[in-house]
Image (cartoon, grey):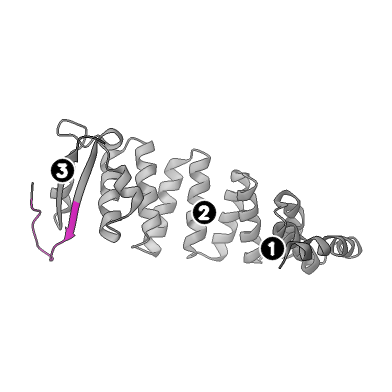
């Protein structure tokens, strides 16, 4: 809908909500008009009313959660996403949004658990695997971060987050560092993994290819 149509809709919808304050449809319409204009703070109140009037309306919960995100009200968004997920337990994007809110509120362990839930639903969800890299790095759990890099590269060998994370400075994958990526390759046992150092940028260049089941890691 053109912006002008949203502008035109505000006045009659506001009047309708005054005449029928418990009308979920007009409240939803008003919230939609405010949202279409980018007036997200003003969309919150009519969405709250819709949530109160129709407590089992999953879409209303999701819309309010997303509006809270746009307003950077992350704690409120977390609460509403959790309500929504109770009604839609396999909505991967809702879980990813929830994980992002957990990260924004420095609840990293909860963000990790939520990404793992996404992977339970969709094992090859590259977004969840890539986000786990960053979450584990924040906790300085470099082994888990390295595992997530390998898994992300298995799914998408050109994944930007995984390739950027393969840095000596961020993951400490040096011979004498906290964790060596060759040791990770041995533990995985089913991937061909070779690395070389690009000294100018301190980046490890990775070559990863799937092997047949029972294959052995080729060391370099």
Quarter of image, res 178: top left
Q: In this view, does 165 lie to the left or right of 187?
A: right
SS at mark 2 in the image: helix
| Image position, residue 45 (x, y; %) | 76, 53
* Rendered residue at 57%/65% (across/down): 87
Which of pointers 1 and 2 lies earlier in the amino acid sequence?
1
State the residue in front, 67 or 109.
67
How many neighbours does mark 3 have within 10 angstroms: few (below 14), some (14-19), or many (20 or more)? few
- State if disc 1 and disc 3 touch (CB < 8 Å): no
Give the label on residue 55, or none: 1
**Residue annotated with mark 3:** 196
- State if disc 2 and disc 1 touch (CB < 8 Å): no
Mark 3, mark 2: which one is toward the viewer? 3
* Rendered residue at 66%/66% (across/down): 56
Q: What stretch is highlighted in magenta?
A: 207-218
- State if disc 2 and disc 3 touch (CB < 8 Å): no
As drawn, 131 above or below 58: above
| Image position, residue 108 (x, y; %) | 44, 41
In the rendered image, the residue lying farthest to the top is: 176
As drawn, 23 above or below 189: below
Which of pointers 3 and 2 lies earlier in the amino acid sequence?
2
């Amino acid at each position: 809908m053109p912006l002008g149509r949203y502008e035109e809709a505000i006045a009659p919808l506001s009047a309708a909500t005054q005449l029928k304050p418990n009308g979920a449809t007009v409240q939803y319409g008003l919230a939609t008009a405010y949202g279409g204009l980018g007036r997200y703070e003003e969309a919150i109140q009519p969405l709250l009313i819709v949530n109160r009037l129709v407590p089992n309306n999953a879409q209303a919960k999701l819309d309010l959660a997303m509006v809270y995100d746009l307003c950077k009200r992350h704690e409120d968004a977390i609460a509403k996403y959790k309500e929504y997920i109770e009604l839609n337990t396999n909505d991967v994007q809702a879980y990813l949004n929830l994980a992002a809110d957990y990260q924004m509120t420095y609840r990293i362990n909860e963000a990790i658990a939520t990404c793992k839930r996404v992977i339970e639903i969709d094992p090859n969800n590259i977004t969840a695997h890539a986000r786990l890299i960053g979450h584990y790095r924040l906790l300085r759990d470099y082994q888990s971060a390295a595992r997530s890099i390998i898994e992300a590269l298995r799914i998408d060998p050109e994944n930007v987050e995984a390739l950027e994370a393969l840095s000596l400075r961020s993951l400490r994958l040096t011979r004498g560092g906290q964790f060596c990526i060759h040791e990770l390759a041995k533990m995985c046992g089913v991937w061909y993994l070779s690395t070389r150092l690009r000294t100018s940028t301190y980046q490890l260049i990775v070559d990863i290819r799937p092997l047949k089941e029972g294959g052995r890691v080729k060391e370099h």
